[in-house]
Image (spheres, grey):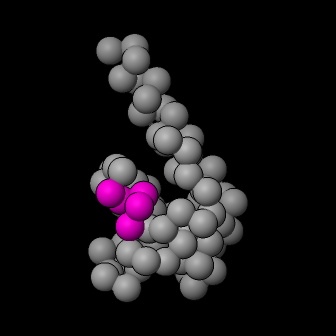
Amino acid sequence: MEFTKETTMGEMLQYDMDIAMLLMQCGMHCVGCPSSIGESLEDACMVHGLDADDVLKAINDFLADKEAAKANA
């Protein structure tokens, strides 16, 4: 699955909880906050002063690498 800037934080975490660590490494330390679940990635990045395109690329790269590792296992 590939995400967009409109994907909500809740949708991403429901798909793969490992994304939470990546988001925290990017500077989003409120990943577990109930109000963040309904926010889009773009809105969450704006609140934290992060570039949504950079964070989105990091997430999609992370998921692609994870899928590749599964395929090679």
Q: Is residue 52 left or right of residue 67?
A: right
Residue at screen point 59% across, 78% down = 43
> Residue 32 sits in which quadrant?
bottom left
Label the magenta part by its dominant secondary structure: helix
Q: Position of residue 26 (x, y in %)?
A: 51, 64
> Where on the picture, by quarter, is residue 19?
bottom left
Q: Position of residue 17 (x, y in %)?
A: 30, 54
Give the residue at x 44% y 68%. Answer: 9
Magenta-highlighted residues: 10-14
Residue at position x 42%, y 33% in the image:
66
Coordinates of residue 21 in the picture (x, y in percent):
36, 58
Q: Is residue 7 magenta?
A: no
In the picture, the quarter occupied by the C terminus is: top left
In this rendered view, identify the residue nearer to me: 13 or 61: 13
Say above or below: 40 vs 20: below
Quarter of the view holding residue 40: bottom right
| Residue 24 visible to an observer of this rendering | no
Q: Provide residue 53's location: percent of width, then percent of height.
A: 69, 60
